[in-house]
Image: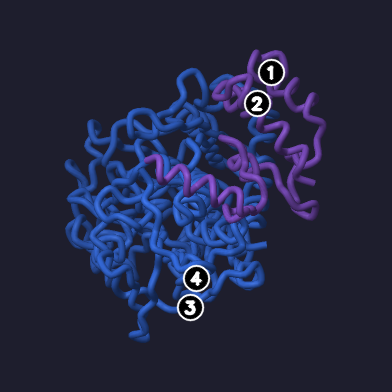
Amino acid sequence: MKARHAFLVMLVCAGMTPAAAAEAPSGAASCTGCHAEEPNVDTPVPRLGGQDANVMVAAMQAYRSGQRPATVMDRIAKGFSEDEIKAIAAWFVMQR
Amino acid sequence: MFPLPLLAQGAQPRIVVIGGGFAGATAARFLKRADPRLNVTLIEPNPVFAACPFSNEVIAGLRDMRAQLFGYDRIATAGVVVVHQAATAVDGQTRTVTLGSGAKLAYDRLVLAPGSDLRFDALRGYDEAAAERMPHAWKAGQQTLLLRRQLEAMEDGGTVVMTLPALPYRCPPASYERASLIAHYLKTKKPRSKLVVLDAKDTFSMQRLFESAWQELYPNLEWLSVSSGGNPTAVDAAAMTVSSDFDTYKAAVANIIPPQKAGRIAELAGTADRTGWCPVDPVTFESRLVPGIHVLGDAAIAGAVPKSAFAANAAAKICAAAVAKLVFGEAPAVPKFVNTCYSLVAPDYGISVAGVYQPVNGQWLEVEGAGGISPVDAPRAFRSQEAKFANGWFNTITSEIFG
């Protein structure tokens, strides 16, 4: 195990690990099934890319507590913790 | 824990994806997106994909078939090598895929997304020839149009008979959506006709929502469960009859949805178990039977995860991220994902079921307290809003995959 760790550290230092776009946090990849990434998609569902993180977190909290009326987001928001919601919101801010 | 594969320095890991539906096409595109260094090949015999979601609207005359068709050009532009051939064999030992042409492709990791196959040995009298008279229309395309034409040509007053199989099968709510939309078509265009639904189940997803809508909208729809004698047992395509435990029905049009199993190549690859479906690890969707092969979409047995297009797409994105890490010897993140399935009971009447899933003790389980069905007592404006969201979902998901 130690040898493996040392090898991985070397890889990291040499910049050889996958350096592609930052990975979506847990749960975030599902959002774009309904919330379009592209601006030209015909849908009444709002895009999330570039949204204000605080606004998104507040919306998810309100969906979760039932304070904000919803068709399906209330049911979905209840499946995510405070930390998960913050991580997802922070990630979508970067997706413009 | 995750052994480093033997990759020559600078060599591109080779990922082969079999099947260009919601699961496979998503996986191919998101593998390339996760890491452009991956060499991704998508194997799909059909040059045009015909989507099943919303094909019930085509059957009911509410939508043009062309709205269901998608090409692979943009997936190729995204850097995926698209090969329009069938995969005829998979060797999990030597890690090679054989194509229809006889050519062999080597892979470091294989993603299998062959969808579901219809079992033509499961309902007495229902084989491929019978399906030309009694369409299943459970794979979108010619079968969809055949059922559409039969309904259009039927005389007013004829009886439409549907049969529904036991679980598991591709997108069960879609069979009740279809019953609803056929009933809608009959009500508006063939008011003297009726629909009889013979079901191999007693309960089903969103049952309270469907039944209350049927009560309100469709007196022409008769649903017969197993305990009310509805279990379908045999068909006779020449006589156009459908038999249940208790009765035989003469059908003007018959729509037979037979029992199903994972697509054939999953069985050939050794990834299907005795149930006919493929058990997988929840974090990576790697087969529990053959290492190096990941199984996605309808073909997989993934705990509580439904066989829906939404889940296929969401799971494929998770699998793509995991595979992009595994090939470089890294540990994949523990994922979580959402499923949302819309069904249309009428053109402006949508209902939904949602769930949030996470791996617990080696199984995908629903997060408790989340998910569930649309409220039973919601006003019509709510149903109308969900119908609009259903349309938006289809446009969004197909744009993400094929656009």
For the residues labelled 3 and 4, the Cα–Cα distance comes to 11 Å
In the picture, measured across the screen, residue B203 lies left or right of residue B40, that is left
Question: Are discs 2 and 4 less than 8 Å apart at CB?
Answer: no
Which label was assigned to residue A61?
1
Work out which quarter of the rendered image holds the C terminus of chain B and state it. bottom right
**Mark 2 Cα shell of 10 Å, populated few (<14), some (14-19), many (≥20):** many
Q: Amino acid at mark 1?
A: Gln
Q: Residue at x 23, y 60 (%)?
A: B270
Question: Closest to the observer: B299 or B39?
Answer: B39
Q: Residue at x 40, y 68 (%)?
A: B107
Q: Are marks 2 and 4 on the same chain?
A: no
Q: Is residue A10 visible?
A: yes
Q: Secondary structure at mark 2?
A: helix
Question: Closest to the observer: B394 or A80?
Answer: A80
Pointer 4 residue: B41
Q: Residue at x 41, y 38 (%)?
A: B305
Q: Residue at x 42, y 30 (%)?
A: B207
Pointer 2 residue: A85
Residue B189 placement (x, y as % from top left): 56, 53
Chain A rendering hue: purple
Residue B67 placement (x, y as % from top left): 63, 62
Select label 3 or label 4 by which is in front.
Answer: 4
Question: Are discs 1 and 2 less than 8 Å apart at CB?
Answer: yes
A6, above or below B48, in the image: above
